[in-house]
Image (cartoon, rainbow, N blue to C red):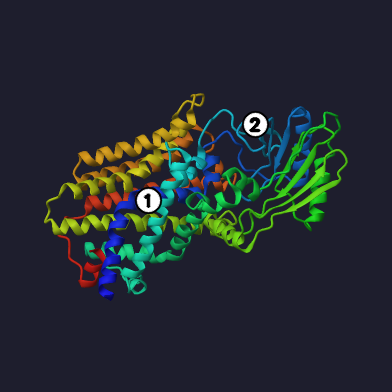
Amino acid sequence: MKDSFRQSMAWLHVWGGLVAGWVLFFIFVTGTLGYFHKEIDRWMRPELPLAGARMAPAQALERADHYLRQHAAGSDFWVVEMPDDRRQALQLAWGNGSPFGRDREQRVLDATGAFVPVATPRETGGGYALYRMHWKLHYLPQYAGLMIVGLFTMALFVILLTGIVTHKKIFADFFTFRPGKGQRSWLDLHNLLSVAALPFFLMISFSGLVFYMEFYMPAGVTANFGTMDRYWKALEPQRDVAPSGRSAPVLPLSGFAGAAAREWRGGMPDIILVRHPGDAAAEVMLIHDGSRTIMRNVYERLHYAAPDGALLERETARQSPVLGVRSALLGLHEGIFSGWWLRWLYFASGLLGCGMIATGLVLWTVKRQRKQNGRQSFGLRMVECLNIGTLAGLPVGIAAYFWANRLLPVDLTGRAAWEAHCLFLGWGAMLLWSSLRPARRAWIEVLGAAAGLFAGLPLLNMLTTDRHLGRTLPAADWALASFDLMALLAGICFAAAALHLHNRKRTPVRPVGRLGRKALA
């Protein structure tokens, strides 16, 4: 009975991993890049100023206040976003409509103390477009994308659990790697990568399901709130501010920031929002967003009357124990609270997840090649093509996305959409190429294409912008410099993989032992 159960779990692990593997690889790759989506955003907007010596917050806020009074006096709102570890400079926004929507004017404070346009002239999806693909895919309605990602996230959770059951010596196998032994080596590598960040994989899959549980299990929302809109309003209530029609000046913003610092015992606001500036009913909201804590959606807000500075409301997010657990899981999933070292650890764990999925898919084909004695069935050939086109081809598509950012005309209509089109056109081309070439040659050629595109990014950046390593390194702008350096490192890794395959002699695949056969059955 025990062996039968393990064999059943092994079957589910293998075939579940095969069916879900390519979509999960896409989700893991885009999610891993999403941990640095703000830094990728900066690289894809080379018009933004370099990170220089940061101005004192009080002085920067005074400049922002003066600029808004000069240039945005007739707007419905002002937004001031204070600098932090990832947002190097103070940012402004103003306009009519939603304060955090897309239809607003934006400026950023550069190192010289001048405010320059944020998104001029380059339209781009940036790193956030990759991050969105992680949880809603692309070319699909949002609800459909969420449901598909949820289904595959559940599959990942099941695959992880069945893998733990199947490999009862999984932790002992973590310390075992036997290179040059064909199928056995692939299994060792798969085990090593799987165990290296197993707690992270379990956390990321379970918290991913919790992220949109109201979509996956809507009965509770329907029973208690009726509609999803009412649920969101109850979860994140908004204070309505209506203009009075009578004019009144806004007090200096620095005074409100000082009052907030006293309320928060030295804590400075992350965001300052002024609604209906110049109106007698105008309000100033100061937000301490709680992004430095593991709990998501934990914030403090202070509401002041803009003309006289009277405190109108002190708002703190209060969560039930259940909502608190959910908030902690979502915070762990996104990692927004993390500092630089922990963010890199998240990134490395995501790469290990990509490697775990990739080695599992390759292992499936290696085993069946041995069984078919060199002849390939249609199914095996299809899986091999999908492996090559996705495991090596998706990086080509992502590199094409970055190349498109530098090569597409800056005034092209729908430019951000065309960047995404280039990603999927590049990926699709590699899928087609892998179906037309012998497998071994296709692996070498597609990996070589990925190597060339990634290694060429720093050179392309130098030829098309002035935000290259020759400037970013002396300026200590590590966000921009790290992008070019990581692209170069990725190119070297892909080139090493291609050279290894090119130089490797064709050797017969060695069989594995009895327990290995059970694990791969």
The image position of residue 113, as x and y in percent, is: 72, 37
Q: Is the Cβ of the residue at disc 2 closer than 8 Å to that at disc 1? A: no
Counting every numbered tag in the picture gives: 2
> Is residue 417 shown to the viewer in this render?
yes
Q: Assign the N terminus to one quadrant of the image.
A: bottom left
In what element is the residue under mark 2? loop
In what element is the residue under mark 1? helix
Q: Which sits in the foreground, 124 or 481? A: 124
Tell me which numbered mark, 2 or 1, is placed earlier along the sequence.
1
397 on left or right of 364: right
* 465 lies above or below 312: above
146 on left or right of 308: left
Identify residue type, mark 1. Phe
Please identify the quarter of the rendering in which residue 362 is found. Answer: bottom left
The image position of residue 392, as x and y in percent, is: 32, 46
Q: Badge 2, how many Cα within 10 Å: few under 14, some, many 20+?
A: some
Residue sitting at the far right: 308
Task: Identify residue for label 2.
Answer: 104
Task: Identify residue for label 1.
Answer: 25
